Image (cartoon, rainbow, N blue to C red):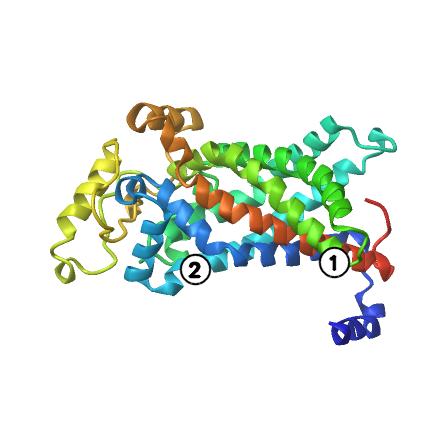
Amino acid sequence: DDMLWCLLQAAAPALVLPPPVMSLGIGSVAGAAGAFVVYPLDLIKTRLQSSAGAALYSNGLDAAADVWANEGPLGLYRGVGTQLVGVAPEKTLKLFVNDAVRGAPVWGAAVPLHGEVLAGFLAGLCQVVVTNPLEITKVRLQLQPSASVFDVLRDLGFRGLYGGAGATALRDSTFSACLFPLFAHAKPLVAAWLGPDADSIAYASFIAGAIAATPAALIATPADVVKTRLQQGRGALAECVAEPEAQPEVQPQLVAASVAAFDGGAGRAAGPSVGWAPPAPREASAAVGSVREAAADILREEGVATFWDGSVERVLRSAPQFGVTLAVYDALRVACVEHGWLPGGS
């Protein structure tokens, strides 16, 4: 660590960039670090929330075991490249807008609670421009083991990249409106509890970020389920990871579960996991329906409990992800302020 800072100090003249550029840079690094650590939980969450996954899997452990058995450990990181490409602009824009709104002169010396909520809401809303194309691509890759990025992009087209954008906006704005105010108030409390030690800054940011992300993730889960259903594609049957002849004993059950999921069959497939059934066909690739229609379909055909599918995995993912993201962001920002690369202030 000391050697790294010595190198950074020696290169300081070359590293001095305009404050907005520095903020964008540290936001990118922080976002990528947080996303990579918890990506397998994101993949499992998406599969649980899809219509076929709702019929095939009873819980996250069942889904994880099935991915491991049929796709190997690297299957848990399917689509991570898209996530890492997208997380930099997404988290950068989110953190930048939140900081900009909080720092607006209209608030005066202290930002009121409604100003904090507004800053978080606008941060989540603005990021959808970047988030949605990457989200729908990531969801398709997570649910279609045989598809490549180029397959997904070709099938979606430019307009298709913004399928389900309304649900994405609802999820992201709700999440951020809850996350940032909670983080702002939890951090000083955690820091006071940990003590004045300089090393406690990063720990306080991590713990406060995890605390803030937990209720935020829960509140935004129904919108996330609707988003997944809108972006997965419709009209799918089964596409087993193994060839049909390689698994003749599981193929009928797999097809039945997938058909039941598409036709609105409620309940979970009984017995052990039988292999992943991707829910999106090539010929019906664009997101179909509105947020209201999708939510009404889920409520009518599967019940209110379905809106909370993947909630445990979402919390387990979001808490450490945003803990890491906000801790890294705060640590880098403090370091940049100390070295004169960024102006002081909150």
Residue 230 at what x, y percent from top left? 39, 36
Q: Amino acid at mark 2?
A: Tyr
How would you rate the neighbour count of disc 2 (Cα within 10 Å): few for under 14, some for 14-19, many for 20 or more?
some
Q: Is residue 7 above or below residue 279?
A: below
- Residue for point 72% across, 39% down: 184
Is disc 1 placed on a helix, strand or loop? helix
Is disc 2 placed on a helix, strand or loop? helix
Disc 1 to disc 2: CB gap under 8 Å: no
Q: From the viewer's perspective, is 115 left or right of 43?
A: right
Picture quadrant of residue 150: bottom left
Please name the residue that numbered disc 1 is placed on.
332
How many marks the image carries: the answer is 2
| Quarter in which the C terminus is drawn | top right
Q: Amino acid at mark 1?
A: Leu
Please name the residue that numbered disc 2 is placed on.
77
Residue 67 at what x, y percent from top left? 33, 57
Q: Nearer the viewer, residue 303 or 22?
A: 303
Q: Check residue 179 in the rendering and tell me which mark sits there, or answer none.
A: none
Q: From the viewer's perspective, is 206 left or right of 244?
A: right
Q: From the viewer's perspective, is 210 left or right of 331?
A: left
Q: Nearer the viewer, residue 71 or 291?
A: 71
Q: Distance from label 1 to label 2 (Cα)?
A: 27 Å
- Residue for point 75% across, 36% down: 101
- Residue for point 36% across, 54% down: 64
Residue 280 at what x, y percent from top left? 31, 45
- Residue for point 38% across, 40% down: 49
Residue 298 at what x, y percent from top left? 34, 28
Q: Nearer the viewer, residue 279 or 53?
A: 53
- Residue 47 visible to an observer of this rendering: yes
